Amino acid sequence: MGNNPNINIKEIVRESCKEKGLSLARLALQLSTNQVYLLNVLHGRKVSRPMISKIAKALNIPNLPTLYELFLKDRKNKSKKPRGKGKIPLGGGESNADARRQEE
């Protein structure tokens, strides 16, 4: 797997399932969870180290917990980027209405 900075946990798990003839839905059943929760964990929307450990054990991927930690760290670093909504800051506590009045 190398040092890929864009670790995709879902694809690692999906490939392992494919090799074993399992769907993600079947894996979810084996893990006593539902597919939506499983996908949320694999995408990083829900953080569940215990679930990742169960997946690692079920699919025999011993380094999956380590990869998951790298994946979470990478996601955290990406989320630190500013998320502007295209609005230009007015500064000085002005509202949009104040700025429009000044333009008139």
Image: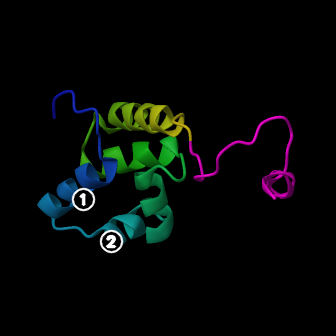
Specify the color scheme. rainbow
Q: Is residue 3 above or below residue 76?
A: above
Q: Is residue 88 above or below residue 70?
A: below
Q: Earlier in the sequence, mark 2 or mark 1?
A: 1
Marks 2 and 1 sit apart, C-alpha to C-alpha, by: 11 Å
Amino acid type of disc 2? Arg
Amino acid type of disc 1? Arg
**Residue at the spot 18% in from the left edge and 56% down from the top edge:** 15
Q: Position of residue 23 (x, y in %)?
A: 26, 70
Q: Residues within 10 Å of mark 2 (few under 14, many from 20)?
A: some
Q: Is residue 35 left or right of residue 18?
A: right
What label does residue 14 carry, if any?
A: 1
Q: Position of residue 42 (x, y in %)?
A: 40, 53
Our reading of the magenta stretch's main secondary structure is loop
* Residue 36 can be seen, yes or no: yes
Q: Which residues are magenta?
A: 83-104
